[in-house]
Image (tube, helix red, strand yellow):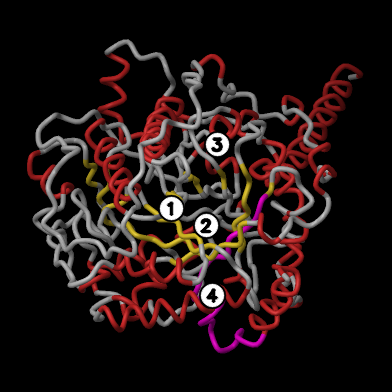
Amino acid sequence: MFSVMRKVFLNQKYILRAAALLLTAAMLLPFFGCSKRPADLVDNDASFELSESEPESSAAESSSQTEEESTASSSSDSEASSDESSEASESEPASDSSSESAEGSSQSSHSSQSSKPSESSQSSQPSQSSAASKPEKEPSSSQSSQTPAESESESSKPDSSSSSQSSQPSQTSSSAPDQSTSTPVPAGGEMRAMWFSYLDLNPMLTGKTKAQFTSAINAAFDNVAELGLNTVIVQVRPFADALYNSDYFPWSSYVTGKQGVAPSFDPLAVMIQAARARGLRIEAWINPYRVKTSGNSTASLSSDNMAKKWIAEENDAVVVTANGIYYNPASPDAQQLIVNGVKEIVANYDVDGIHFDDYFYPSPDNSFDAKSYAAYKSAGGKLSLGDWRRENVNTLVRNVYAAIKSIDSSVVFGISPQGNMWNNYNTQYIDVEKWVTNSGYIDYIMPQIYFGFNNTACPYTQTVANWNSLITNKNITLYIGLSPYKIGTTDNFAGNGKTEWLNNTDIIARQVTTSRKYARCGGFALFRYASVFSPAANVSVQVKTEMSNLKDVLS
């Protein structure tokens, strides 16, 4: 009898202990994505399956840049062409309902060599405006001669079974600001940027004359300068198409209304001239892999679109899914095409930088690249699926960086990943820690820290501190992506910070002054233009007050 009672007691004891551990894990889990370094995150690789819409119970909010685009009220949304506007709606959900560990992307296979992109194809497009043409210079060498370390082997990556908190290094020290630069950054040395999405440019540009676009962009850049900003980041390749004169990519439908139809002027040249006239820096924002996100029909793609040609040739440089078309991150042909497109911008246009956003692998689903990964393994490859995907992206990033520096070492290359490190590592398959601790990848990192100070999972100050501590390469600068599109709204996935953006009018200003306390941080960018200068009527007064408070700290 005693032995039976003892067993019952012990069983209850173990059950209670297990329940306590589970409860503790549940409470701590939401903090992993924003509070852990990428190397500390669990890499679920081959077993990771992620639905397109995570349950609310596991969500804080999505940090994906273009997911946020639709939440920023803008009259441009309704003016997009029918095909491309459906792409915007597919890739940009209308709410932050996806999980903090939300959507990523994947792609497949090695590409064949047919129709390989040439580095010297002739353009049949209108010539650039002389005001925007690149001044002639002697090509300069890369800023760094260091060869980046090759991707870590599978054995050096986190064990997918090691998810307990006890195996994670403590991050408590990173919450304290680095006091070495605790005073505000001088005005001349701080990046103060505004993102111009294709959604912002659409109502100014699509179907307009040169005079109409010039007038609109001049007014927009006047607004940017008057606010106290010094940089514009303009999206010039949203869907593997171009808002500039390209040898490799077709004219965007956001220029004339139909892809492949050339305008009588060069929009990027006009924007460069407008920026220079106002003393603004200008960076060209590129979406490298995305071709189409509203179904898989090629009907809307122009005949000179390389994706359409490769699909017809069954070249696996392009991946066609049920919901979209993407350039394959694993394909040497696709990588070369993207690099060529970067080179022509740096060589032909007077830009200050090349900027990538947070769209890399279009899905974490294993089936996207099962064939090409199997081929890699058959050829003797040793990397896990996740490491292999990350190295595919690393290869592109290294090659883009080297290409830029070989033409003009003064042109910077930066990437704006999600603010959530777990998402970046496990769903986008980007190894941000590698980029910010080694030379030869990027000049700056601009995480989209679209969180308020009271956000439960990713509180702003702690998240900035974690990104600051991640960077060990002294040549890499941290800029912070901020979210004025949230002003005056309920942040449903922010936990304790749900009403923060409703009840305050100085969040952006405080975020800027807070970031100045960290040694690696050199500025910020606001997402996006319409959120600040064409907000919804019900938040316009609050946005105006927020921007007035921001202007005060920029004086």
Residue farthest toward the top in the current orientation of the protein: 380
Q: Residue at x 70, y 42 (%)?
A: 468
Q: Quadrant of the N terminus?
A: top right
Mark 3–mark 1 distance (CA, rounded to whole Å): 23 Å
- Expressed as whole percent of the image width and height from the top left, the position of residue 252 reads 24, 63
- Sequence-wise first label, 4 or 1: 1
Mark 2–mark 4 distance (CA, rounded to whole Å): 21 Å
Q: Mark 2 highlights which residue? A: 98
Q: Residue at x 65, y 36 (%)?
A: 471
| Dot label at residue 432 | 3
Q: Mark 1 highlights which residue? A: 52
The image quarter containing residue 481 is bottom right
- Expressed as whole percent of the image width and height from the top left, the position of residue 196 reads 45, 67
| Dot label at residue 531 | 4
- Sequence-wise first label, 3 or 4: 3
- Sequence-wise first label, 2 or 4: 2
Q: Are marks 2 and 1 in contact (CB under 8 Å)?
A: yes
Q: Is residue 168 magenta?
A: no
- Sequence-wise first label, 2 or 1: 1
Q: Residue at x 16, y 57 (%)?
A: 297
Which residues, given as a range, are shown in magenta? Answer: 522-541
Front position in the image: 10 or 384: 384
Residue farthest toward the right in the current orientation of the protein: 2
Mark 2–mark 1 distance (CA, rounded to whole Å): 8 Å
- Sequence-wise first label, 3 or 1: 1
Q: Is residue 89 left or right of residue 81?
A: right
